[in-house]
């Protein structure tokens, strides 16, 4: 009898072990396999949250099939107490293991709300936008000009949240003065800029910042980025350029930046100025004259007067020979590369062509014909 009982007990133990092992394998497979999420979502983890709360939310959102397995998997991988506050993008089909990794790895938020501080040439704009997980594109919620407008109420709550991302975007061609004035308006930054950065030394780019970063540290990042861009472009420059140093390359690049907004024209514009420098011709570039008037502090807002074109300043390239003494703006990578690798042309003139671009010429006669054509276009536009 006891032998039968022992045999039955052993059989039951084997069955339980078999079932337990199967259950563990099923749980492991469920934890690691493709999840039920059909469309990417943004998961916000509040400060002080825990895996229990998150698992319930994920079940409600249809991101996981079993909250218990999700929590057990997090426990087993020693990640239950590693949740990071923020907003995180969870892609479609993400497994429970993937989601645990996304929510515990740390770093900046990957979705949710973002405030972009755009510092432009003619105006600045602060934009509140939200990532649409379905398209992985940001949708604008509100915007305003910090120079003259009050911040919309929509900005208040995101500015108070730790998981809101902040990004500073510098337009190509902004001056250092414009950058500093723009940074003064960014309320999440701290500290003062002690000294105006040298013109041309800040890279137009998009910079993610955190609340509490100093303005000085952001300026430092911009300067380091421009140094790296200029160094690389200088190493890859073509032979025979009439440029004695990286600083002269930066000056030329800034003029190219201000002369054209058409990306395809940059190397042609660069060729005009390089050819003029080689031939000893004056550069005769209006943006440099304007910089001599404004010193980069704002926009002139009108056309140049004849008296200003004749007045001698260090930046009046109608009067001085060669390059002006400093850059006239902060050029972007493409203009720096164009200055150091211009198109091979014989052009020494260019003028607006009425389409947003320019007409280029090798001779004064061709240039005069292009100018006459532009004058007719201007007159037609004025009469409309």
Image: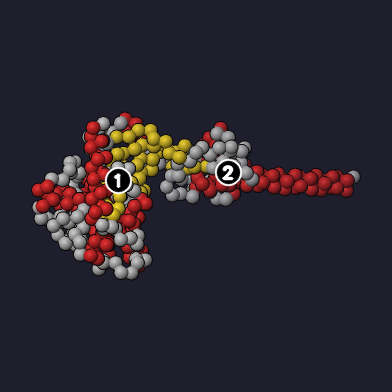
Q: Quadrant of residue 137?
A: top left
Tell me the number on the disc at residue 353.
1
Judged left or right of residue 48, residue 187 is left
Q: Residue at x 75, y 44 (%)?
A: 19
**Pointer 2 residue:** 94
Mark 2 vs mark 1, CA separation in Å = 53 Å
Is there any visible trace of residue 207 in the rendered image?
Answer: no
Q: Residue at x 34, y 66 (%)?
A: 237
Image coords of residue 141 (percent x, y) = 38, 33
Q: Quadrant of residue 60?
A: top right
Judged left or right of residue 185, residue 47 is right
Q: Residue at x 79, y 45 (%)?
A: 15
Image coords of residue 114 (percent x, y) = 38, 40
Going from N to C along the chain, the mark reached first, 2 or 1, is 2
Is there any visible trace of residue 359 in the rendered image?
Answer: yes
Label 2: few (<14), some or many (≥20) within 10 Å? many
Q: Secondary structure at mark 1?
A: loop
Image coords of residue 339 (percent x, y) = 31, 60
Image coords of residue 337 (percent x, y) = 34, 59
């Amino acid at each position: 009898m006891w032998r039968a009982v022992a045999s039955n007990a052993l059989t039951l133990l084997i069955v339980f072990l078999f079932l337990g092992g199967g259950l563990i394998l099923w749980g492991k497979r469920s934890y690691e396999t493709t999840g039920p999420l059909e469309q990417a979502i943004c998961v916000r983890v509040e400060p002080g949250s825990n895996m229990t709360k998150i698992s319930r939310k994920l079940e409600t959102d249809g991101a996981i099939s079993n909250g218990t397995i999700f929590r057990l998997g997090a426990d087993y991988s020693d990640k239950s107490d590693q949740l990071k506050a923020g907003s995180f993008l969870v892609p479609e089909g993400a497994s429970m293991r993937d989601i645990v990794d996304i929510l515990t790895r740390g770093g900046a938020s990957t979705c949710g709300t973002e405030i972009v501080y755009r510092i432009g040439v003619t105006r600045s704009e602060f934009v509140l936008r939200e990532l649409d997980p379905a398209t992985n594109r940001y949708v604008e919620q509100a915007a305003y000009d910090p120079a003259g407008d009050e911040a919309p109420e929509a900005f208040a709550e995101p500015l108070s949240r730790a998981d809101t991302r902040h990004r500073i975007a510098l337009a190509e061609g902004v001056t250092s003065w414009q950058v500093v004035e723009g940074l003064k308006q960014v309320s999440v930054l701290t500290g003062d800029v002690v000294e105006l950065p040298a013109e041309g030394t800040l890279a137009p780019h998009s910079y993610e910042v955190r609340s509490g970063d100093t303005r000085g540290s952001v300026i430092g990042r911009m300067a380091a980025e421009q140094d790296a861009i200029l160094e690389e472009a200088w190493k890859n420059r073509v032979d025979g350029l009439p440029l004695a140093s990286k600083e002269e390359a930066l000056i030329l690049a800034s003029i190219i930046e201000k002369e054209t907004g058409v990306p395809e024209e940059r190397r042609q514009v660069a060729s005009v100025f390089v050819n003029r420098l080689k031939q000893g011709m004056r550069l005769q570039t209006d943006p440099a004259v304007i910089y001599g008037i404004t010193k980069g502090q704002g926009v002139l807002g009108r056309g140049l007067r004849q008296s200003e074109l004749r007045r001698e300043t260090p930046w009046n390239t109608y009067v001085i020979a060669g390059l002006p003494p400093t850059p006239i703006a902060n050029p972007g990578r493409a203009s720096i590369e164009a200055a150091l690798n211009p198109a091979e042309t014989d052009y020494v003139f260019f003028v607006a062509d009425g389409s947003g671009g320019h007409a280029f010429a090798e001779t004064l006669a061709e240039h005069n014909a292009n100018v006459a054509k532009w004058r007719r276009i201007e007159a037609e536009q004025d009469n409309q």
